[in-house]
Amino acid sequence: SSFGFRDVDAREKVQLVRGVFDSVASNYDLMNDLMSGGVHRLWKDAAAAKLNPRPGERILDVAGGTGDMARRYAKMARRAQQRLGGADARVIVLDYNAEMIMAGVHKGGEPEMTWTVGDAMALPLPDASVDAYSISFGIRNVADIPQALREARRVLKPGGRFLCLEFSRPTAEPIRKAYDLWSFNAIPAIGGWVAKDRDSYQYLVESIRRFPDQNTFKAMIEDAGFSRVTVTNLSGGVAAIHHGWAL
Ligand code: SAM
């Protein structure tokens, strides 16, 4: 070609690209399962149940990655729709990493789902345009958390729900001890062996330490203008669901 690259047959190119996204998505899933002992699936189920998606709703899943939460929301809204009737729900997966989005598309969506590349700190959506906002294991990585929370408040309709699933602080001493051993030793080691990337997993553990505890984060959500904010601890506070209302 004129750019000096060897010409790749279109079909071959599709195969190459698929291979990359396949391995991104499956590595990501495998690491989540190894590091949490599969428990992240139960946490996600609990968070989806808490969000309680309804027929006809417009639900935004920010930092949605490969779409784990969005798939749950779409299926739950459809199940409710089969019982109650009403319009189809719409679930928007938004992530600033196009590779994660592509991996999610490759993994497969539900008919209610659409995929968007965008930033949690500057959402490409109008004011008061969604019924529910969710962010799962994403807010910890956002550079300006108060700004992301203000954006969540802005795009929610009056009466809309905010939900965040994130690592938090184990509440009981024995759990805290076991968790420290696991996270400081096992997680970087597994990251080194499986993902060949010890440093990234070391960073992951440190970012969890730096993230505010349950009550501090609850206060930040309230500062962004949310009401009736509640905390649900999961696995003794290893993770937590924060839920609030845009009233
Ligand atoms: N929500 C998915 C889940 O629970 O499996 C993915 C979580 S993954 C650990 C974190 C995701 O946050 C990544 O896909 C990353 O690209 C995304 N992310 C980080 N900062 C972001 C930002 N400012 N805006 C949008 N996405 C962001």
Image (cartoon, rainbow, N blue to C red):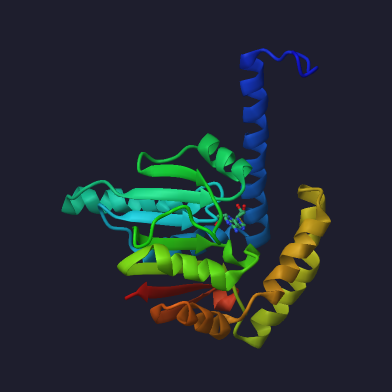
Please tell me whether residue 59 is drawn above or below residue 185 in the rendered image: above
Task: Tell me residue 89's x, y (percent).
Answer: 30, 49
The residue sitting at the left extreme is 85
Looking at the picture, tell me which residue is in the foreground, 69 or 181.
Answer: 69
**Is residue 46 among what the camera can see?**
no
As rendered, which of 159 and 121 lies closer to the eye? 121
**Residue at horizontal 18 percent and vertical 50 percent from the top:** 86
**Percent position of residue 52, x then y:** 33, 63
Q: Residue at x 67, y 55 (%)?
A: 34
Location of residue 199 (image quadrant)? bottom right
Query: On the rendered structure, is 114 left or right of 213?
Result: left
Which residue is rendered at x = 57% and y = 38% of the image?
102
Image quadrant of ligand 1?
Answer: bottom right
Q: Is 214 left or right of 81, judged from the image as shown? A: right
Residue 103 percent across, percent down from the top left = 58, 39
Up-down relation of residue 98 to residue 11 (above or below):
below
Looking at the rendering, in which quadrant would you find the C terminus? bottom left
Height in image: 54 above or below 230? above
Q: Quadrant of the N terminus?
A: top right
| Relative image position of residue 69 (x, y in whole percent) | 47, 54
Q: Residue 57's image quarter?
A: bottom left
Residue at the image point whose x is 48% and y is 65% from the top: 151
Residue 88 shown left or right of residue 150 in the figure: left
